[in-house]
Image: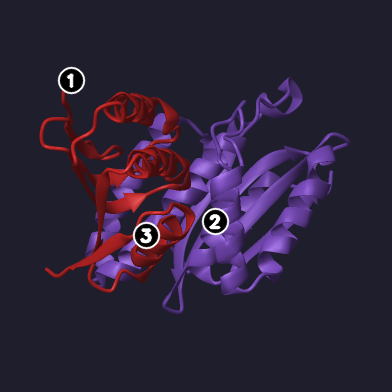
Chain colours: A purple, B red
Amino acid sequence: MSFNIEERYTKMNKGEVLLAYKGSITAELITNVLGVVESKLDHVIDHSITKKKIYNILVESLQNLYHHVDDLPDRISDSMDIHFGIFVISKMDEMYDIRTGNFIKNDKIKKLKERLDKIKSLSKDELKELYKFVLNNQKFSDKGGGGLGLIDIARRTDGKVDYEFDTYDDEYSFFSLNITI
Amino acid sequence: MESISIEGTPKTPTVNFDATTGIIEVKGRSIPENSIEFYRPLVEWLEEYSKEPQKLTTVNIQLEYFNTSSSKCILDVFKKLETIKKARNEVVINWYYEEDDEDMLEAGEDYESIIRIPFKMIEVVD
């Protein structure tokens, strides 16, 4: 098999790592991590607005991850976890990186890729218009997401969002999202 | 009509809705994974209040953080207020944001452009 989760995790642990996790993604975990990271940020960043920006994006990206860790089949969950995901928060050259990773069904890749490419191609004003349109017109999905998370992240970071898909097997791939603040 | 008074938590805001004074306040942070449950009773309260509102309804929104899941629910709250205003009642919305927090100011402007009530933007200086 060409894709190795350990290698991916190591690759994601770049820079000065503030926090790294791989395993089961639960609501309690996200709540605890947000608490821990917030107090860490209080120590390392003086500027309240920068801190707020990072925290906002962290909330959005971790909750996005939480909403998208679908039940995995036994062949994957046996060695990892049924709601397996990865996230790393690190600092490099005065920039902060938030990286998340989760499995995705291959048949969902096309749609997500198109969505990400579209969001990445939009200007600040176009993102604002798209955000307002989705806010006003789109209903909540059954996962509780509003379809606004990625748009919000792109707006706050001026589009500094990158992604990768690594094929895992016939049915699944691993989706990595890299946000730079 | 009973008032709503909810204490804030690390994930949910402090809420005070008072039908006798017409003062509606949401303060703190609103970042639950799924906001619908939290906001449903607030939207229902406003629905009831809109039947017999005060002549003047004053809305104070002072949020430190809110996630996109909350943003839709907050819009639902504003839409109820828009209905009250359309029925020829006065509605004043005060949108507070921390000094230099452009993102929060812009979030207020986004709402203002969707609903037809002017916002008063109030910068909070430490």
Q: Nearer the viewer, residue A82 or B111?
A: B111
Residue at figure coordinates x 62%, y 69% from the top left: A126
What residue does disc 3 label? B108
Q: Residues within 10 Å of mark 2 (few under 14, many from 20)?
A: some
Q: Is residue A59 above or below residue B38?
A: below
Q: CA distance from mark 2 to mark 3?
A: 11 Å
Query: Label 2: which residue?
Result: A132
What is the C-alpha distance between the residues marked 1 and 2?
34 Å
Could you say which disc has been placed on residue B52 in the image? none
Image coords of residue A60 (percent x, y): 47, 49
Amino acid bearing label 1: Met
Picture quadrant where residue A75 is located: top right
Closest to the observer, A8 or A85 = A85
The numbered mark 3 sits on a residue in which chain? B
Q: Provide the secondary structure element on which disc 2 rests.
A: helix
**Residue B66 or residue B115, whichever sits in front:** B115
Residue at the far bottom: name it.
A93
The answer to whether the residues at label 2 and label 3 have Cβ atoms under 8 Å apart is no
Q: Earlier in the sequence, mark 1 or mark 3?
A: 1
**Residue at image mark 1:** B1
Q: Position of residue A17 (x, y in %)?
A: 44, 61
- Tag 2: residue type? Lys
